Amino acid sequence: KQEVTQIPAALSVPEGENLVLNCSFTDSAIYNLQWFRQDPGKGLTSLLLIQSSQREQTSGRLNASLDKSSGRSTLYIAASQPGDSATYLCAVSLSNDYKLSFGAGTTVTVRA
Amino acid sequence: SQTIHQWPATLVQPVGSPLSLECTVEGTSNPNLYWYRQAAGRGLQLLFYSVGIGQISSEVPQNLSASRPQDRQFILSSKKLLLSDSGFYLCAWEGQAGPQHFGDGTRLSIL
C-alpha cells in the first residue's frame, strides 16, 4: 500500500521568503505525482502534475521536483506572498489505476 | 471550459437519516469521477471511483454507496447515516491525462 508523508505539517514564514515543502512516498513505481492547494473549507486546486518520466514541472513561482528512486518530491514557492497561505497536498498514483494516495498536507502561513 | 458542481455546500443530518449528495461535470465527456472524504486532521480518503456510466468501484467498506446514472453525474448516497459519516466530501473529475479537478465540497455534520 502506498504511504505518502508530508513534512512539515505546518510552516510559518515572513513574506518574501522562499517556501520548501516536502513529500515522500513508499512505492517508487508511481504513474504521476500531483501537488494541490486547499484553502480553508474549500475544495482542492491542482497546481502541478509531474509524470513519472519527468523530473520537474514549473508554473510561475512554483517549481516541483520528482526523484522517483528516492521516493521524494519537493514543491518550491519563490518569493512567498500572504495569498500563498493555504494547505498544500501531495498525491501519487500507482500505474494508471485512477487512484490517488494523498499526504496529510502542509499548512503554510505567510506573514505580511 | 470544464466545470464541476457539488451540492449542497453544507448539510446537517440526524443519525439514521438518508443521504444524497450530487456532483455534475460540464464541458467534458466520459470523465473518470471520484468521491473522497476528508475527516478533520486527516488526509483525503478515496471512497468511490467510476470510469463510465453504471461502473462503480468501492475502495473501502462502509455505510455509503455511489451511482453514476449519466455520463457526467455522480451521486453519493446512504440509507442510514452514522455519526462516523461526518466529514468533508469532495467530488473530482479527471480526463485522459489528468490532473484531477475538484468541486468545492460538501460539509456534512451528523447529529
Image (tube, coloured by chain):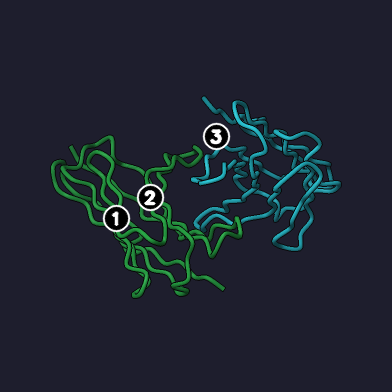
Chain colours: A green, B cyan
Image mark 1: chain: A
Tag shown at residue A88: 2
Mark nearer the viewer, 3 or 1? 1
Image mark 2: chain: A
Q: Residue at x 42, y 67 (%)?
A: A5
Tag shown at residue A56: 1
User: Could you tell me if the residues under marks 1 and 2 are in contact, i.e. CB atoms within 8 Å?
Assistant: no
Same chain under badges 1 and 2? The reply is yes
Label 3 secondary element: loop
Task: Tell me how far mark 1 sits from mark 2, CA to CA.
Answer: 17 Å
The residue singled out by tag 3 in the image is: B104
In the displayed structure, does residue B69 sit left or right of residue B90?
Answer: right
In front of the other: B56 or A111? B56
Amino acid carrying label 3: it is Asp
**Crowding at mark 3 (Cα within 10 Å: few <14, some 14-19, many 20+):** many
Residue A8 image offset from top left, x and y in percent: 31, 62
Residue A100 image offset from top left, x and y in percent: 54, 57
**Crowding at mark 2 (Cα within 10 Å: few <14, some 14-19, many 20+):** many
Label 1 secondary element: strand
In the displayed structure, does residue B61 sit left or right of residue A4?
Answer: right
